[in-house]
Image: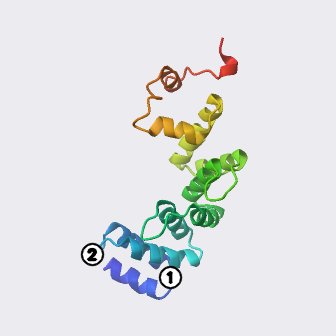
């Protein structure tokens, strides 16, 4: 029943109906088959109407090359920005990551990335808290935050098991300038 009502609202141009129907298509719920192309299309319609959650989800589709869309970091960055400006914490975090890493044609800017992470943290967005922490440790280690992420998250990496990694996780890592 919900899918039918969302479809009706979507057909009438209501962004919330478009967004919710897209979610049903993306997850294959509400009696609808999973269809990422239709989800991307519906997110696009709602995003054009300025619906922040749709802008975010469409940006993620572009960033991942999902729903038949080509992987396109520039388009993802373009879509993250208005959602972030509307105060969506997830979009603020993702735009912060793009700026932190200089992705999507955006210039790398530590101050702006930190500002966006901070905005998302203030809204209680847990991943942003991890992102802000990652940036802090990266500065202490004098490496980029993306290098730290790869070292910490890559299963083939030996970094986390190294003596530096163990000191970091045990809270005993001292920046080079503070070592005896």
Q: What residue is shown at x 61% (from left), y 48% (from top)?
A: 101
Q: For residue 111, say whether it is visible.
A: yes
Q: For residue 19, say whether it is visible.
A: no
Dividing the image into 4 quarters, which one contains the C terminus?
top right
Q: Pointer 2: what residue? A: 31
Q: Residues within 10 Å of mark 1 (few under 14, many from 20)?
A: some
Give the SS element for disc 2: loop
Residue furthest to the left in view is 31
Q: Position of residue 45 (x, y in %)?
A: 51, 79
Q: What residue is shown at x 55% (from left), y 68% (from top)?
A: 55
Q: How many tags in the picture?
A: 2
Q: How is the image coloured?
A: rainbow
Q: Position of residue 73 (x, y in %)?
A: 57, 61
Q: What residue is shown at x 43% (from left), y 65% (from top)?
A: 66
Q: Pointer 1: what residue? A: 14
Q: What residue is shown at x 66% (from left), y 49% (from top)?
A: 113
Q: Position of residue 150 (x, y in %)?
A: 50, 40
Residue furthest to the top in view is 180
Residue furthest to the bottom in view is 12
């Amino acid at each position: 029943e919900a899918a039918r009502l969302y479809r009706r609202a979507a057909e009438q141009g209501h962004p919330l109906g478009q967004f919710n129907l897209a979610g049903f298509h993306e997850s294959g719920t509400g009696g609808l088959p999973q269809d990422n192309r239709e989800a991307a299309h519906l997110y696009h319609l709602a995003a054009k109407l300025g619906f922040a959650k749709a802008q975010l989800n469409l940006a993620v589709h572009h960033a991942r090359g999902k729903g038949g869309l080509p992987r396109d970091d520039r388009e993802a960055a373009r879509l993250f920005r208005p959602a972030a400006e509307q105060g969506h914490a997830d979009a603020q975090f993702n735009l912060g990551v793009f700026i932190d890493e200089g992705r999507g044609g955006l210039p790398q800017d530590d101050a702006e990335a930190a500002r966006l992470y901070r905005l998302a943290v203030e809204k209680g967005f847990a991943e942003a808290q991890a992102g802000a922490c990652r940036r802090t440790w990266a500065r202490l280690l004098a490496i980029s935050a993306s290098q730290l992420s790869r070292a910490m998250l890559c299963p083939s990496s030996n970094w986390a098991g190294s003596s530096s990694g163990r000191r970091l996780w045990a809270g005993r890592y001292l920046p080079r300038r503070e070592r005896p």
